[in-house]
Image (cartoon, grey):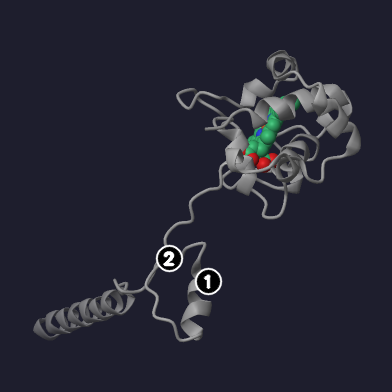
Amino acid sequence: MKRLLSRQITVVVLLLLCGAILVVSCAPNADEPIISPQLGTLLALREAGEEVAALPTPTPVLLATLSDEQIYAGLPDDIMAALASADPASAESISLNAGCIGCHKLDLNEQSTGPYWYHMGDTAVSRVPGESPALYLYKSIVDPSAYIVPGYQDGLMPKTFGETLTTQQLADLIAFLLAQRQ
Ligand code: HEC
């Protein structure tokens, strides 16, 4: 009986020891940068022999700092032409009728199933590197699967707006979304 008890105690002690070793070996090193979107850059700099702890978070580029050319680059000609006479005010009734506002909100205090449209114009600048904000918005509406906003799922937003909305309606929506900026 006594031997059995001491054996059990030995087993418990061994288990505790293993646990302690595991915890110590997994403890994070406070001097290591955490995994971040800049990890690739950090590792490259390190390999090049540079001393780097962490990089500052890049400040987002605001729409207001871009030229018209940079804002509208790559848009299809018909959308570009329609934008010249776009009426952002009519976008409100379009997004009501098309159901956009069932999923998208401008007001951060409202519950929203899709990404908020708050400052959408500024957000659109850096969503897809190399893609102009107007082109990004156009593609987001007619081809929502082309880029999936982090934290959201593909397949929720209807993929038919390219057919159900007219060129002018698409242009009005793009003009309206671009106007949501700082
Ligand atoms: C049933 C819900 C739903 C409806 C209706 C809907 N969307 Fe979306 N939308 C989403 C979701 C979810 C995403 C994020 C997933 C993705 O990127 O495809 C999204 C993404 C977007 C984005 C990109 C947002 C960002 O932050 O980059 C834009 C722009 C957009 N939608 C515009 C529209 C417009 C305009 C309409 C109406 C014509 C509309 N959506 C209708 C759900 C919806």
Displayed quadrant of residue 31: bottom left
- Indicate which quadrant contains ligand 1: top right
Residue 14 position within the rendered picture, expressed as x and y whole percent measured from the top left: 22, 83
The residue that appears at 55% across and 28% down in the rendered structure is: 112
| Residue 118, image x, y percentages | 54, 30
What residue is at 51 percent from the left and 23 percent from the top? 107
Disc sitting over residue 127 in the figure? none
Residue for badge 1? 41
Q: Alpha-carbon distance for marks 2 and 1?
A: 9 Å
Residue 115 visible in the shown view: no
The answer to whether residue 179 is left or right of residue 107 is: right
Residue pointed to by mark 2 = 55
Quadrant location of the N terminus in the rendered image: bottom left
Sequence-wise first label, 2 or 1: 1
Judge whether residue 131 can be spotted in this image: yes
88 relative to 125, above or below: above
Q: Relative to the observer, which residue lies in front, 152 or 21?
A: 152
Mark 2 CB in 8 Å range of ligand 1?
no
Residue 162, image x and y in percent?
85, 32
Left or right position of 110 against 164: left
Could you say which is closer to the camera, residue 40 or residue 2? 40
Q: Does dot 2 land on a helix, a strand or a loop?
A: loop
Badge 2 amino acid: Leu
Give the side of residue 105 with respect to residue 156, left or right: left
Q: Residues within 10 Å of mark 1 (few under 14, many from 20)?
A: few
